Amino acid sequence: MANAVFGFSNMILKAIGEIKPTHIACAFDTAAPTFRHIEFEKYKAQRKAPPPDLYPQLPKVKKVLDAFGIPYFEKEGYEADDLLATLTVKSLSNVIAIRRKPEKQSQTKGKKIASSRTPRNDRVDQVIILSGDRDVLQLVDGNIKVQMPGWNLNQTSLYGAAEVREKFALEPHQMVDYKSLIGDLSDNIPGIAGIGPVTAASLLHKFHTLEELFAQLERNPGSLGNVAEKLKAGRDVAVAAKRLVELDRNVDIEFKVGDLNFNPDWEKVRREYEDLGFKSIVSKLPGMNKEEVSKVSNVSNNNNEDQLKLI
């Protein structure tokens, strides 16, 4: 069986064609319990076991990634989403620091010295996270978007800050506090009893953060009406939920942005898919003609400094 490998391959090729990334990285869960399982024994306890033929296919997926030259990361104790968060934040931190670095005046000539720029393959300006897990929406900001596949993998939705606001009536950074209040059924994380999506969104519109909401509860519980008692009863639940919902953006993984540079050897990719017997995928690969090779292989050499993308 190789249906997971086939589906993954179609998804990654579609993303490469649409996004035209300059850098790519992939993250995997491991079979080991995460810090969330240790902190909350019932975390994801309701989920059914994955199909028995799924895990045996993972080595084949990794071989496909090796053929593309795409690095992948996994770390016991953490979920793939934590690794994606870390890769995203650390990949962008360099360029953000460069942009914010003030210009200096030369003491000898009185001229402005512009801050130095890192090499193109060592920086990214934008990250697009390809994931079907809404937990990563908490990462969305001006430099980060999330592309989520639908039930039909050929249909995807791209979420920037505006799309998150439109769908959830919240800022992306409020998604953590929102789920802390209402819980997350998909991960078996309880929320505060009696507080649903509408109430949670309304509270966060007014008080912005979970911490400020509970500070108001201490200062003036009467201002919160009949919600005050629910908040008092469920405060510990929400605080515990936040520790589970919030992604770790500082996982101890070693990488350089340059390691993620995407410049595939399409002939190597073709051989890998031929070995797998994926004729329909082979027929779609650039490399079938020189024009297509040029279109896709040269995305890493794009001269537009504002379109250096990591997925």
Image: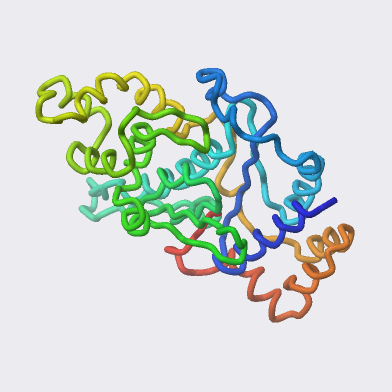
Side of 102 where 215 appears, left or right: left
Residue occupying image coordinates x 46% and y 28% = 244
Q: Nearer the viewer, residue 265 or 45?
A: 45
Pinpoint residue 42: horizontal percent, then vertical percent: 55, 23
Side of 80 where 292 appears, left or right: right
Residue occupying image coordinates x 41% and y 50% = 95
Side of 1 where 149 appears, left or right: left
Is residue 185 shown above or below 12? above
Residue occupying image coordinates x 51% and y 31% = 188
Res 160 quadrant in image:
bottom left
Is residue 178 shown above or below 39? below
Indicate the quadrant containing the C terminus: top left, top right, bottom left or bottom right: bottom right
Side of 258 where 221 appears, left or right: left
Is residue 80 shown above or below 222? below
Pinpoint residue 267: horizontal percent, then vertical percent: 81, 66
What colouring style does the render use?
A: rainbow
Pinpoint residue 115: horizontal percent, then vertical percent: 35, 50
For the image, the number of numbered tags is 0
Residue occupying image coordinates x 11% and y 21% = 219
Q: Nearer the viewer, residue 275 or 95?
A: 275
Pinpoint residue 241: horizontal percent, then vertical percent: 41, 27
